[in-house]
Image: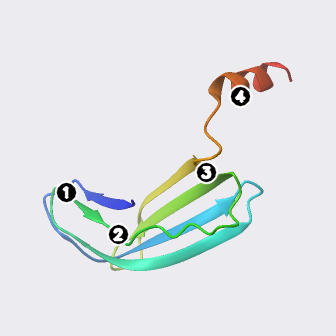
Amino acid sequence: MVQVINNLPTAFSNAVAHIALYNQDGTLAAEHSEPVNAAPYRATNLAPLQVPDQIAAVHFLRLDLKDADGKLVSSNTYWLSQPWNPNDFPTSRRCRQSR
């Protein structure tokens, strides 16, 4: 689930959330934008995230939120993996140390 968190004392109206999924190699796997109206001090759910079947085992989620004037308000990037490809942090550390 993707949410917009409004931690301001005023409502957030006519904003636009842009959601993009990227494969591990940086290619765009999917994207869409949707309007956002968020009440003060509230979390607002966005539409369910549609993850393509062909997305890489490790992929990235980029969330950009722009206000009604098109000004970038927030930008976040998350590193994700498929449920069948759980994070293996001990192996990750060994790979980094072996360089």
**Mark 2 nearby-residue class (10 Å; few <14, some 14–19, many ≥20):** some
Q: Which residue is mark 2?
A: 46
Which image quarter holds the C terminus? top right
**Disc assigned to residue 19:** none
Q: Earlier in the sequence, mark 1 or mark 2?
A: 1
**Disc assigned to residue 92:** 4
Q: Amino acid at mark 2?
A: Leu
**Mark 1 nearby-residue class (10 Å; few <14, some 14–19, many ≥20):** few
Judged by depth in the image, the label closer to the viewer, 3 or 2, is 3
Judged by depth in the image, the label closer to the viewer, 3 or 1, is 3
Q: Can you say whether 45 is above or below 93 in the image?
A: below
Q: Earlier in the sequence, mark 3 or mark 1?
A: 1
**Disc assigned to residue 8:** 1
**Mark 3 nearby-residue class (10 Å; few <14, some 14–19, many ≥20):** few
In the image, residue 3 lies at what x, y percent?
34, 60
Judged by depth in the image, the label closer to the viewer, 3 or 4, is 3
Q: Residue at x 79, y 26 (%)?
A: 95
The span from disc 3 to disc 1 (Cα, nearest Å) is: 34 Å
Q: Amino acid at mark 3?
A: Gln
Q: Secondary structure at mark 2?
A: loop
The span from disc 4 to disc 2 (Cα, nearest Å) is: 32 Å
Q: Residue at x 66, y 62 (%)?
A: 22
**Disc assigned to residue 82:** 3
Q: Secondary structure at mark 3?
A: loop
Q: Earlier in the sequence, mark 4 or mark 1?
A: 1
Which image quarter holds the N terminus? bottom left
- Asked if labels 4 and 3 touch by Cβ distance under 8 angstroms, the answer is no
The span from disc 3 to disc 4 (Cα, nearest Å) is: 16 Å
